[in-house]
Image (cartoon, grey):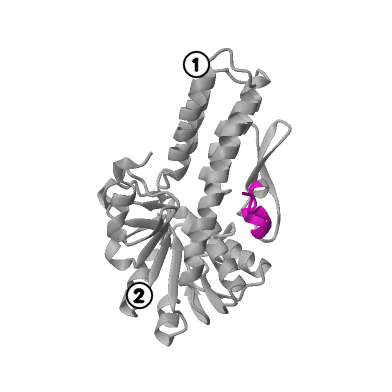
Amino acid sequence: MNIDNKLPWLLQKKHIAHIEGDHLLIGDRRRYPWEHSYVACSSVAQIAQAIAEMVTQGGGPLQVGLTTMRFLAKKIEAGHESNALTSFASAVELLAAARPTNTTMRRTLERFLKHLQPWYANDSSQKSLITFVGSIIDAIEAGFDADYQQMSDHGSLLITNNAGILTTCFAEHTFILSLIKAREQGKNFTVYVPETRPYLQGARLTAPALVELGLQVQLITDGMGAHFMGQGAITHYMTAADVVAMDGTVVNKTGTLANAICAQYYQIPYTVFAMSPDPSIHTASDIVMEERDGKEVLYVNGKLTTLESITGRYPAFDCIDPALISHIITPKGLAFPHEIDSLYGQREK
């Protein structure tokens, strides 16, 4: 099931990451929407560095990680890397360390390693390494595409006609597909998109992607969510989740918490799209919260906005209490936060 033809440019797999010759090319979200450009990487170390430097973010590192496994298999067959399972395992560790809070890439690539083990255990395999790796990645990608479709079915039904939908940062596949399907169902709505300092993912990624799809968008600053809720313009709050713990705690981009608190005050439902709740994370205390270099908040698009001598702080994520969340949409269906453990827990395969 390939959903790329429904999605905006920057969410299509080949534009998130693809292989050309001896390089893996990563779509440079720092330059979007002004440029459709790529960062070329010739090693796993360079790919991990690109992820850490926000060349891609949100769900992007997952697709980059999967494509990296194809890239590494190609390098191994060309004799440029050691032909051993440890080569893949080391690559997984390096990539996962680049953005530690969002654990979906790590857990997905660890699942890939389990499926790869038989190739190294069976010297008589009739498939080349590239073919074997490709078949595993193809199956994983098809599984995610199916999850996107199922989750967006739920999301679209929650959107009412003439809705005002607030989001935070760039919620990617499931949220955008929900909007597409809601429009196909004949619903009118407006999406309110906060700019998302300091990298402006809302202004540069979400808003242009929705405009590309012909959806109604209003760009607002990060502090305006409460204002529009108070005016009655916003009827739904919807975001992605970088991490969901088993107690229903959600981690998402900084700014999500403030909007969630305001949504509860104004009795506006807050729905979270969660691709992969993490069964190893039980409560908020188990979550590794990334704090990036505070100097990043002194700049916008490479331009200094204040005195360079000022100390900045940049906690990259918010931790949202389950009491602030109405529903969590997962690949296993629509759930209340307290139901996440029973759905996923340690029984997840």
Instruction: Work out which residue is located at the far top of the displayed protein and give it.
Output: 123
Residue located at (38% from left, 49% from top) = 277
Determine whether 13 is above or below 318 in the image: above
- Which stretch appears magenta? 1-13
Q: Residue 24 appears at what percent x and percent y?
A: 66, 37
- Please name the amino acid that badge 1 sits on: Ala
Q: Quadrant of residue 32?
A: bottom right
Q: Is residue 248 visible?
A: no
Q: Is residue 135 left or right of residue 228?
A: right
Q: Quadrant of residue 261?
A: bottom left
For this rendering, which residue is in front, 136 or 228? 136
- Please name the amino acid that badge 2 sits on: Cys
Any magenta on residue 2? yes
Determine whether 117 is above or below 220 in the image: above
**In terms of sequence position, does the residue under pointer 1 or pointer 2 come before the other?**
1
Q: Is residue 270 visible?
A: yes
Residue located at (39% from left, 49% from top) = 290
Q: For residue 35, which numbered disc appears in the image?
A: none
Q: Residue 57 appears at what percent x and percent y?
A: 53, 51
For this rendering, which residue is in front, 36 or 71? 71
Q: Residue 197 appears at what percent x and percent y?
A: 49, 63
Q: For residue 262, which numbered disc appears in the image?
A: 2
* Disc 2 secondary structure class: helix
- Which residue does the numbered mark 1 point to in the structure image? 121
Residue located at (65% from left, 59% from top) = 6
Q: Is residue 187 left or right of residue 290?
A: right
Q: Residue 49 appears at what percent x and percent y?
A: 54, 39
Q: Alpha-carbon neighbours of circle 2 within 10 Å: few (<14), some, or many (≥20)?
A: some
